[in-house]
Structure formats: structure tokens, C-alpha cells
Image: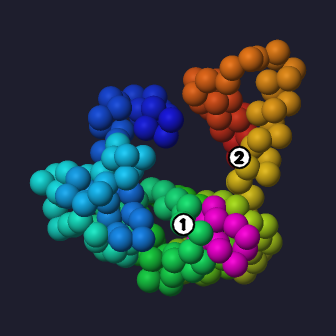
Amino acid sequence: MAIQAVSKMAGCSETAAKSQFFLIDKDGLVTTDRNNLDPAAAPFAKNPRDLEGLTEGASIIEVVKKVRPHVLLGLSGVGGIFNEEVLKAMKESVSTKPAIFAMSSPTMNAECTAIDAFKHAGGDIVFGSGSPFENVDLGNGKVGHVNQANNMYLFLGIGLGSILSGARLITDGMLQAAAEWYAHNSLSC
């Protein structure tokens, strides 16, 4: 669904959208050269011939420095994997407001803390987590807002929405439409 969402939002093909994803697991960057490639990872595996300066198994810091991603999504369950070096590298993101999502929980398994994310990646990031973190005082009256963005809130809304609508099936398109509505209607200036 992530590939389809990026394709729709960016107005590009699914192939072009897929090229924007870099999957890293315990063995590093996942490519088609990987022995025993997990079928679930296969759609995201990079062709090594399409990579300049990155190889099978490249570390997270190598990928972040080379790719300069808009979003760093942590689903590893490995506490602290978004260390100081990785977070500082996110300052070089091609995005003016890079997003860092440390989604693993409980808190001790979060890829980084909110304080570390704002301290090392800067005050212009979007930070979402799977564990509760307090907003971060950035000084000079500025606050780094923390959003708990995990299933604690998501599943309740999906359940209530399906009951209220009488839906018997929840499709990827329905979830995409709900996410787009929420993103559009929750923006404030």
C-alpha cells in the first residue's frame, strides 16, 4: 500500500514510487543479490546495478548519507538504531522538513527518543513514534511536537469507521482516502 500511496500522491508510476524505498534489515540494505531473499522484502529489494555507491548489506548510515531521504521509518524493534550519526545525517535530507518515525515499542525498543531526534536532526523535523514521548523544548519558545502515530489510535478509528459505515471489507483505497482526508484536514498554519 505504501508504494501505491506514494504513486498517487506524487503523480508517478508505481515503478517510480518503488524506486524511492530503501529497505534495511539486520543484514543491511536489501538487494536482489541477497541470498534467501524474504518474499515480503522482494518488492523493495534494489537491483545493485541501479545503485551508485551502495551495495548489498550497506549500513543504515551509508544509505542515509547517500540517499538523503525525506522519511526515516523505524520498524526494527532495535532501540537506539537511529543513533547520533544517523540522526545528524538526516539534517542533510533533501526534504526541508524530514520525518523521523521511531515506531517500535515499548519505549526501550524505540529506534530513537524524541529528545535525541530533535537534538541531532534539528528542530525542523516531523517526529512520530510508537511509544509515548513528551514534546521537546527547543528553546526560544519553540517546541518540537511529538506525535504518537502507532496502532493505538489507528485501529480504533478503522474499527469505528467500519461499524458506522457498515463496511464488510476495508480496502487499500479506503485506507488511502482516509489518510489523505486526515492529512488535508489536520494541517494548520
Residue extending furthest toward the bottom: 84
Question: Is residue 40 at least partly visible in the picture?
Answer: yes
**How many labels sit on residues?**
2
Give the magenta part as a residue range.
102-112
Reply above or below: 189 against 180.
below
Q: Is residue 106 magenta?
A: yes
Question: Is residue 124 at least partly visible in the picture?
Answer: no
- Please name whichever residue, 6 or 23, is drawn nearer the observer in this view of the structure: 23
**Which secondary structure is most common in the magenta stretch?**
loop
Name the disc covering residue 76, or none. Answer: 1
Rendered image quadrant of residue 114:
bottom right
Per the image, the residue denoted by label 2 is 189
Residue kind at label 2, given as amino acid type: Cys
Kindly report the distance in space between the C-alpha atoms of the residues bearing marks 1 and 2: 33 Å
Q: Residue at x 68, y 29 (%)?
A: 178
Q: Residue at x 80, y 72 (%)?
A: 134
Q: Residue at x 42, y 46 (%)?
A: 40
Reply above or below: 35 against 57.
above
Rendered image quadrant of residue 112:
bottom right
Q: Is residue 125 left or right of residue 170?
A: left
- Please name whichever residue, 45 or 5, is drawn nearer the observer in this view of the structure: 45
Rendered image quadrant of residue 144:
bottom right
Dot 1: element: loop
* Residue 8 on image: x %, y %: 46, 28
Residue kind at label 1, given as amino acid type: Ser
